[in-house]
Image (spheres, grey):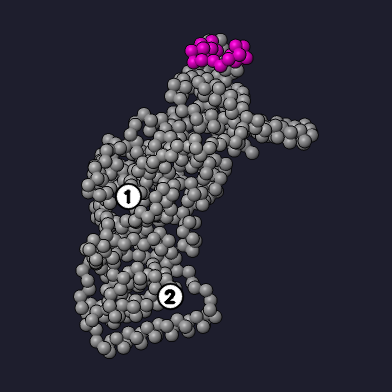
Amino acid sequence: MSPAEVTFQFSSDIQLKLLAAAIAAPEEVRKTGADLRPELFDNPALCDFAKILYKFEHKHKRAIDLEEFAAEVELLLTSDSRIPVDEYRAVQKQLEDAITEGHFEYAIEKAVDFTRHQAMLRAILKGGEILKKGGDFNKIVLEVQSALSIGAEAEELAWRRMSEIEPEDLEWLWEGRFALGKLSLIVGDPESGKSLFSAYMAAHISGAIPWPDTPADKPRPEPGKVVFLQDEDDPEDTLVPRVIQFGGARENIIHVDGIRSAEKGDRLFSLLIDLGRLEKLVTREGNVKLIVLDPLSAYFGVGVGGKLNPHVDAHVRTILSPVKAFAKRLNVAVIGLVHLNKDAQKDMMYRVGGSIALMGVPRSVWLIRWDRDPKGPRYFQYMKSNLKTGIPGLAFYIDPEIGDVRFDLAAEVPKAAELLAVATDRRPREEAKAFLLDRLKNGPRDARELREEAIQEGINYVTLCSARKELGIKPELVYYGDGRRKKWIWPRLSPGEKTEQKRDLKEQIADIKERRDKERANRGQAAEPPVSEAVVEAESQDEPDKPGELTLESFIRGRD
């Protein structure tokens, strides 16, 4: 095991914060039981600075203050000509800045783990020396056990009575969908519109534009700032044009390009080690309402064997738990963009690409689904929400020419489970056609009732919608009662069809059923074959079909 494999989560930034905490908040560090000995720090300057702290505390029996620390550093730098003064000065400046800024909570939380990991590193290296000299293996075991026990006596169960916890009201970024102070996800297939949708949100927040479903009598929102971390699209040719298209205020949107270092070169931002840097930016800017991570997995950082594995539950929780605390502490909405996995046979809760923790840790997960028809609808529907239930999904259209977004607030949006249901093959779709021809021959029907009857017949709703599309049946939105209530109906077959055509339809239905029974018999009741991607069309507000438009010939062409 290499040193990098042991200390991967304790970067120079965390070590710097730990040393800063030992100067500025020594009591808090002491409570953890951590022993921040100088040899624990990788950076030579931090190691020597830690020696100053130790010597001062042993000599004066108290913690050092910043002025005393600066004086001791001056003494160190002038007493040893071998020290690279410029490098030490740079680290000293970083340390003093960290002390001034504060925000030690995460570093202090990691203090014991840091001490243990570094002690484990020394135990492993020492174990190698013991083995080389033919020493007792039990001695190695004792060294490792000693490292693991560091700080254990200082740890205790953290608990509170419910009477001590004050209830808090949620503050919404987008009512019912995304809350401030919470981590959320937007998931979908590649090219489904996740990035474009996040740019649309950024434009509305930055430009104080009301959301598409905001009631007209609600006051206009105040503008807020947005921080983008975007790894796949270039801001110059993608993000900025979209923000302009949607009417956003670019001065309120920040794009994080990465982490710059004169010594090590540029690198990608890492949630594992750079969250403190992001907090510094958000705190300095103020009024940040949204942070977008696109895609989320790109910012998981480097861990054992390379990038942390988004398919491992423990890795995902190691990353996302501090992000949750970060969002709550700064009262900012954090939204990660995640791809769906390719296994359409899985249950909806397992379709998010990665560990199940990607569904468990965020407070809301929203799906964007599209059947790749350039002029067709895209659906925005919740897969999970621990914050508010019963929020309707949205249907929206993207103009392929100019990339503009138009919402259809009257459209009926299928549930996420239906949108993600396994796709249909040809034979089940023909059965769905037969079902519709039979149910609609006597008049229009309520769309919800048809859906329930289809499910009882073993016909998936997505399959039913695909069959409706091929038959050319156009849903209608009708008002009833007091004129305010409305429902979707699927219109009946055209009354202009001839009697002999209706007889032919019955023969067609019988032929489909007969062919189905033969196929089942030939397969010996084999399982249904896997089916392709679900296709669902929005319930549009088009005019009703003209008499005679839906014909037997069009039905047969649809089958071909």
Q: Is residue 162 left or right of residue 55?
A: left
Query: For this rendering, which residue is in front, 536 or 178?
Result: 178
Quadrant (top left, top right, bottom left, bottom right) of the C terminus:
bottom left
Residue 303 position, x and y percent, is: 54, 40
Q: Which tag is nearer the camera, tag 2 or tag 1?
A: 2
Q: Residue at x 47, y 22 (%)?
A: 99
Picture coordinates of residue 217, whole percent (x, y): 22, 47
Of all residues, the one furthest to the front in this rendering is: 163
Residue identified by numbered label 2: 457
Q: Looking at the image, which residue is at 50% across and 80% down?
A: 520
Q: Determine the image quadrant of residue 54.
A: top right
Q: State the image coordinates of residue 142 (x, y, percent, origin top left).
A: 74, 33
Pick whichever, 259 or 467, lies toward us.
Answer: 467
Inspect the magenta stretch and tell me whether residue 62 lies in it: yes
Task: Answer above or below: position of 330 versus 495.
Answer: above
Image position of 280 with respect to 534: above or below: above
Few, some or many residues within 10 Å of mark 1 (<14, 14–19, 20+): some
Decide which of tag 2 and tag 1 comes sooner along the chain.
1
Rendered position, 414 above or below 107:
below
- Residue at position x 27%, y 35% in the image: 251
**Residue where numbered disc 1 is placed:** 196
Tell me the CA gap for discs 2 and 1: 39 Å
Left or right: 416, with 488 as reference point: right
Does residue 103 appear left or right of residue 440 in this picture? right
Name the secondary structure under disc 2: loop
> Would residue 437 be found to the left or right of residue 295 on screen?
left
Q: Amino acid at mark 1?
A: Leu
Q: Quadrant of residue 552?
A: bottom left
- Part of the protein shown in magenta: 55-76
Q: Residue at x 48, y 19 (%)?
A: 92
Predominant secondary structure, magenta span: helix
User: Which quarter shows the N terminus?
Assistant: top right
